[in-house]
Structure formats: structure tokens, C-alpha cells
Amino acid sequence: MPVARSGTLWRWIFAILLIALSAPFFWYSKHEFPHGGSPLGLAYGIAGFLLILLLAFFGIRKRWYRSTWGTLEQWLQAHIYLGLLVLAVLLFHAGGRFSDAIAVTALVLAVIVVFSGVVGAILYATIPRLLTDVESNLTVDEISDQLNQLGRQMARIASAKSPQFQRTYSQLMRQSVPGWLAGWRLLFSEPRAATRQSTTEWSSLLGSVPKDEAEDLRQMLVLSRQRRELLLRLIYQQRYKNVLEAWLYVHVPFTILLLVMSVVHVAAVFYYGPIR
Amino acid sequence: MKHYDLLIVGSGPAGLATASHAEANGLSYSVLERTDHLADTIDSYQARKYVMSEPMMIPSRGELPFVAGSRESILKAWHAHVADRKLNVHFNADVKELRRDDGQFVLTTANGAEYRGAKVVLAMGTQGNPRRLGVPGEELPHVRYRLVDPADHRDQDLLVVGAGDSAMEVAIALSDENRVGLVVRGTEIARANEVLTKEVLSRQATGQLTIYFSAGVKQVYDGYADLIVRGEATRVPAELIFLKLGADAPRKFFESIGVQYSGEGTDARPILSATYESSVPGLFLIGAASGRDLIKLGINQGYEIVEHLMGRDVEPADEAVLRDRLPFWDGTVRERIQSLRKRVPLLAAADEQQLRDTFLSAHVREYGDGDTIIRQNDYTNDFLIIASGRVALWRRPEQAPSEVKIVELTAGNFFGEMSLISGRRRTATARAVGPTRMIEIPRKAILKLLASASAARALVDQAFLLRAFGGYLFPGVPESQLGELVAKAAIQSLPKDAVVFREGDPADAFYLIRNGMVKISKRSGEKEVVLSYLVAGNFFGEAALFDSTRTATVSAIFPSDLIRLGKGDFDRFLAAHPELREAPLRKVEERRIAGLVAEATPGSGRILEDLIRQEVVMGTQTLLIDEHKCIRCGNCIAACEGVHEDGQARLSLTGIHLYNLLAPNSCWQCENPLCMLDCPPDAIARDPRGEVYIKSNCIGCGNCERNCPYDNIFMVHKEPKKSLFSWVASLVGRTEISDVDRTVAVKCDLCREISGGPACVRHCPTAAAIRLTPEEYRSTLEEMVVARNE
């Protein structure tokens, strides 16, 4: 069974296409004034537009499960390398002239789309390993089971104890309550549960309860620490999963905008002629 | 009093078919039905039970409609037929007496009515004669023989008595919503089919029902019952008691009217002519009461009797099909079977009726010189009989470059018993020598034949032992010489995790794995080191034949059957045949060296071991996901849902983890597929590459779903594809209620129908999902796991 990656193949295709496409540009930029309306510029424009359509088609191909036309992995590799190529093609098309507002908008959108795609590719290549490490073969269900179990144990210990003990218990439990916009904050800030309790904090906590409860509190603090470890694991799992998806919230909408802008650009150019 | 040409007792399928065909032929007849409704046996099936129309290959003849379907649909069709043809059925006519008077039969019913007829057909089934407890209180109204609809019962204390299939079915159906006790006479459930037994036992384990083993009912009271459990009296609550003890043909009644039987035992059948006429001239016996309890056979018997009475010759319903199945011989099927029985000892060990049933699903094929009949390592499991010609068996030993000829078999011999018994791949390649005709019998059909013909079973078992032992220890020695040794072998059945012997035990026997799997391990300090795993068809403990203590521990990792050959028997055999001593000694030495090499190579096969321990290696096409590449996009699951019309994903991203590899729950195409064990229509098949798939004749019984230890079979509604038309029709309220709305079993079939392979693998954007066969495990996995440390 091949564990083949078609990446190498597409790197070669990318290199060859890049050379094949840039050579005519440098040749013609020496002989005439390069711009989008010149015959070669138009050819680059058409190629760029078709490439954008093909790249956008990936979204459809990804969900076209009955298709047996290549594997999705091959398609994704093609998507990545043709995506990089399209930027070059569009720059050749513009020929260094950025005066048409619609065209420039489309180009900016294309840059955003390609850039977010590159970010996505990097995330895809790096995050899964980190995710596998924090998962350490525990599923979300298993972790939440263990969390609940630890919570129950802590509740058992805390029941019928002094008010100070109970206050500590509820403080510890509150750490796991998600706050405002928790999902989005997960992407960036340190989770609340990660704030460390220092050993001095521990000893002051232990001193705050009646003597005969100190041993139970110590036990509860240990459980709470285990609980925090699991919670962090859960949070990081979710964070990595969110990260793997978040870039698409830029990539996909901007692709749609880019498609619209490209169509507008093409229509405008053919209707009005180039706006200089 | 009216005089009839034909009196028919019983309005089940056999009786109704007789009546319907008599009506069509203008005979005067009357059907006498004991109860107040048609077909009491079918009527008493559980609501919505699916009724099959076995044997599938035989047509159902005559006028009475019969296609497989729900109990309700079949009864509805019969009611309509009776009304339509105005069939003459007398209800509440319980025949109590049958006598001859003036060359006629006179039947008297319980309410005193008399019926006269020239001929009598007894088609009364066995339902009217259920086995009883014979204890006080049995006649109370809350003691029932049938369960109408499990949905009628909720939150009740119920008792089910019996240990057969129908007792299990009732207990399972009721235990969903009630507190059910199951009273079983023996110390275990031995008679019922394996799936039901397993289900009942697992429900007991989870507390959903209580099984009283070695138990009997002593007395029944209103609301409770006294049981004797293992000799001690116990009182248990019982709002209702269901007796499911089976039923008997009313033999006493039959014998009282002069019908003779073939013997005394419970499996004796009434002696009948080819036209089902009993030893009393003019008295015919058909259906379950005659010992053939398949609905379709009963219907055909009724048709044939009327044809016979009309003076027309009628050939058996299976005649045309069987002529087709046995094409290379002349004459009637009976003559063809006779000539085959003369040539093939195995066939001579079964009777004609058993062979007719078996040949219905068999094929005869012709092979030219050198043609391959079966191929080593394929997963086919037909049983093969050489009708004429010769067959050479070839085997390629592991890692050997070319194959060697093991034996040449002549006409009358059979092979394929190894795959049949152990469920493993083919152990040899068979090629025709000269023009050869093979009878190829599917696994299920041959198993059925062997279960009913014990003489044939003994022949196959003996051949299995001879070939397995002979081929392993005494290659080249003729089978005839090994007979006396093999005769001493005994079968030993082990549950999962049972230890066969321990390191240091005295060595007293040598074993062959008939089916299942064992683990061979050694202690190394505190740790257990697994030396190897052996599957069916392998031997172990052979060193015992020449040594005195065990050097390793062997335990079963699945329920396994072992064939044990005692050291004493072996020594006596070698003493009698000293010239045979050389070959087994050499084999033992070979194995010993191989064992030492494996021990001396630390880490070899470690990954494989882990996988076997976690039972992944059972699969022949396991899906694995490299979590270092997996971006958790879920596209594999979406693709699986997308390519199947029912929208049910066959995999989930949970399963067995091993380093960075996940073996997700999807079908593992097991080496020994437990799902195939008990499929009533034989709808689960495997192709030569080992892929297990479910055919379209699934009846949705759910046996395979329950049988799969990995929860990888799903029951889904097979919804007809929504068309635009049906959608519009549904808007104006014209929804068609489809009869096909029933559940069917689905599982991962590796996307057989799509070119390019499984959708999950093709739709993984980062190639994290791959499918591996066991042979690819070691290299690929080590590669992948090593890659993780880079």
C-alpha cells in the first residue's frame, strides 16, 4: 500500500510551470510595455482566472465523495502549489501596473487568500503532531469522564466541611467554568485553568481550614491538580482543533469575494475597456 | 352427511395449498381447522416476525401465494386467497377420531360433527401439540404458549421456560421493558443458536434478565411460581409465564390410526411413499407433522398430492433445479444421485433427501488438465468433491520460492475440509490432472449436511485429522498408515484466555489448532515474553513427543478447539513403525531452532505483537490513521456517509491507539468473521481476497450486528431514493407507504462498488488514512512509527 505523498510531484510541476510562465514575461517586458491589456497580459489574465476557478473547485471536489478522479490528497497538493503559482500569474498579468481600482482590489483579495492558504498549509503540517501529543490517546469522552469522576471525588471530600473548606472547593471548581467568548479566546490567550497555584498558595490554603480538615484539603488539592492537568489537555486539544479550522474562516470567505471581484473585473474590462 | 373427495386436516400452508389446488381441479374437499383462525403456527409468530421462504432455489407451486415477508403480510395474503377462491374451511373443527367405514374415512370432531371423505390429508402441523410442564397450576390462564406482541408488556415480572431458539427470542424481546426470568433445565444453553445464546447471556451479565440454570417449575400459582433451582426450592414472581418447550407431531394419534414410523427415537419420521401416502392407504401426511417443517416444502407437498390424485405424474419441485445442478449425468435426479453415491463414499454416508437439499446450492464444474480449482491463501470456502478425474494438491511453504506437490487425489475423494473446519485461507493450490469434474458445495450447505448426517461428518473429520497430522509430521506417508494414530486424537474446547499448559509442566501431548488462536509465551524475569501467535491449522507442543517438560506457556486468546494427541499414543505408534521416526524428529528440531532465533532477536515483531494483543491483526484490510498527518477534518467520515445511500458512516474516529497510529472502528474484515456465523439467509459473504460484504438478501434480523465484537455493523433503514416526483407527491399528501421500509445490516465493504478503493482513504486530504493487510503491517508500521521520532 503506498503511503505516497504527491507533494514531491507537485513541487516539480510547480517549479516547471513557474519557469515556463515567467520566461515569456521577462522576454516581453524587455520588448514592450507590460500591461494587462497586451496580448500576453491578456493570456496571463485568462490563465489566472481559470486557475482561480480550478482552485475554488477544490471546495466542491472535497465534498464530491463519489468522484474517483484522483485522490483528495493529490487534489490538495495541486491546490497548494497551483495556489502559489496563481499569485505569480496575476502579477505577470498586471505587469507592475496597479491603477485599476477593481483589479487592485481583486489582487489584494488574492494575496489574502493565498497568504491564508500558506498559513493553513503550515498549520496542517505542524499542528497534528502537537495535537496527538496532548491527546495522548485519550478521547474527549474519556477525558470528560475522568474529569467528572475527579469532580465527584472532590465533592465527596468537601461535603459537610467547614465554610473555608467549601469556599476553596468552589473556587477550585470554578476554574473549569468557561467564560465569555471562551471558544474564540481559546485561539489566543492562556486558558484560565492554566494559571498556576504556587506552593505558598497551597500552604496558605491549608492553614485557612481547621486542623482536622487539612489532610482532606491536601487530598482535594491533589485531585484538583490532576483535574487541572486533564482540563488543560482538553483545552489544548480544542485549541489545536480550532486552530486547524480557524484559518478557513479567512480563506473561504475571501475566496468567495475574490471570485466575485474577478468576475466583476473581467466584466468591467470587456465592457468599458481598461480604466487607465 | 356430505361426502367429500378429500378431507384436509389443518389450515396451515400445507393444508391451504392442498385445498386451493383441489378447488382449482374441481375436487370436493373440506378443510378442518382446530382453531378459529387460519394457520395457527404462523399466526402465533411474534408480531412483525420476518418469515423466510427457504429453500430459495425451489419454486413454490400451486395457487397459494407465498413470498418471504412479515408474518402480517403472509397471513394477509392467505386470508385474501381463502376469501377470493371461497375455499371451504371449517373452523373450530378439532378432529378427535378417524376411522374407516365402508371404504371411506370418517372424521369426528370435538363438537361431535362427522365428515366423510375418500381420502384424508393430515396437514395439522405440531402447534396443536406443544410440550407441557406437567405440573399443578399449568392450566391457569396466565400460562401462555405464545407471545403475541412484546410491545403489549411493560414493567411486568415474567417467566419464560425453555432453552430453544423461540424461548430465547421471547426472553430477549420481553427483557427490553420487563423483569424476565428464564428457566433452563440444563446447566447451560446448548440447543439454541449461538447468537441468541450470546445475547441472552450478555443480558444476564448486564442484569437485564435472570437465567435460572439447572432449574424446573414445580408449581404455578396466580402471580408467582415455585421453581426448583439446583435442587433448592425458590419462589419467584410471575405475572405471566411463557412455555416455550417445543412441540411434537401427535405421534400417538397417528399410530392409533395405523400410521407406521421408521423407528422409536424422537427424530423418527412416519413412513411415507413418494406421494406422501402413509402406511394407511388413502391417508396422506404432509407439512411439519411429516417431519419437514419448511413452509414452502409443505405448500409443494399439498400441490403434489392433488396432482397425484388427479392421476397426473408430478415430479418433485426440486427436480428441475437439481437436474440443472447435476448436468453431466443421465436419468432422473434420483438416478444421478444414486450413481454419484456409488462413486463417492462421502455421499453414500447421507440419504437421498439430505443430498437433494445439499445439491440445491451446489455446482458441478469441469476443469481441463492443469486448470486451477482453488488457490493457496485464497479465502474461498467451498467444499470440493472429485466426481471424476484427478486433482493434484500443491503447497508453497512459507518463504519458499516454488510450490511442491503434496498429494494426488482420485475420483471419489474430497478436499477443502481444512478451510471448512478452521475457517482459514486455503492451505494448498488444487489443479486438475486431465479432464476433471468437481462438485463444489458452499460452506453453509455442507455444514448443514454434516450436521444431519453423522456418518458423513465422521468421514470429513477423519480426513481433516489425517491430512493435518500427516502433512505436518509425516509428509509423504500414505494416509492409510496414519489411521490408527489419528483415531486416538481427541477434541478439547477452550474458552478465551484458558491456559493449555504452562512452562515447566510435564509434557504429555501434542496439539493441532482446529479453530481459534493461541499465544505462546515464556517468562523472562518478571515479564511475560510472547514468542508467537498461532492460528487454526497450526501445531504446537510437538517437542513433548521427545522431551519431558514444557518450555513455554500456551493459552487460547480466542475461544478455540484443539485436537490433542497424547504422548503415550504417539510413542506406541512410533514403536510399531520405527521407520517413521525420522520425519517428526526433524520437524521438532526445525521448530526449536526457529523459536531460539525469535527469542534471540529482541524487539522483532514487537509492533505486530501489540497489534495482535489488541486484536487488530484479525483484520485483513485494516484502516489506519496516522495522527501525525491527520488534520481532524472528518472528511473520511463525511465521505463514507456521502458514498452510501443510507448516509450511515461505517467508521468512527475512535478505536485502538498505538503510538501515533489509530486503528479506527470500521470493519476489520476479520480472519474469522463472527458476523458470518449465524446469518439466516447466508447474506454475508467474503470474496477470495478476504473482504467480507453483505449481499442484498439481508433480512435485517440483526444477528450479525449482535455478533460483531467491534460494533462495526449497523442496522439502517433502507430508504428508497427520494425523487423529485415523490417529493411533490408528498406535498399533496400522496405518500406511498413502502413495504421495503425495513432495516438492513450495513458495514464497511471497502467501497466495493466504487472504482479506486475506499472513499475514506481517497478523501483524506493529507493521506493520513491508509488501508493495510497484515503482511504490510510490520514494515509499514515500523516505518511510520520510526518517522514519528524524526
Image (cartoon, grey):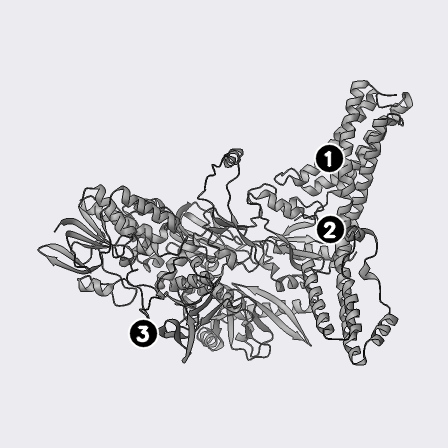
- Asked which secondary structure carries label 1, the reply is helix
Q: Are marks 3 and 1 on the same chain?
A: no
- Asked which secondary structure carries label 2, the reply is loop
Callout 3: chain:
B
- Asked which secondary structure carries label 3, the reply is loop
* Residue B526 vertical placement versus B317 (above, below): below
In the rendered view of the protein, which quadrant contains the C terminus of chain A?
Answer: top right
Q: Are marks 2 and 3 on the same chain?
A: yes
Q: Position of residue B260 (x, y in %)?
A: 20, 62
Q: Position of residue B376 (x, y in %)?
A: 52, 54
C-alpha distance separating marks 3 and 1: 81 Å
Residue nearest the viewer, comparing B653 with B626: B653
- The residue carrying pointer 1 sits among few (fewer than 14), some (14 to 19) or many (20 or more) residues within 10 Å by Cα, namely some
Residue that carries the numbered disc 2 in the rendered image: B629
The circle on residue A56 is 1
Q: Are marks 2 and 3 in contact (CB under 8 Å)?
A: no
- The residue carrying pointer 2 sits among few (fewer than 14), some (14 to 19) or many (20 or more) residues within 10 Å by Cα, namely many
Q: Is residue B488 left or right of residue B122?
A: right
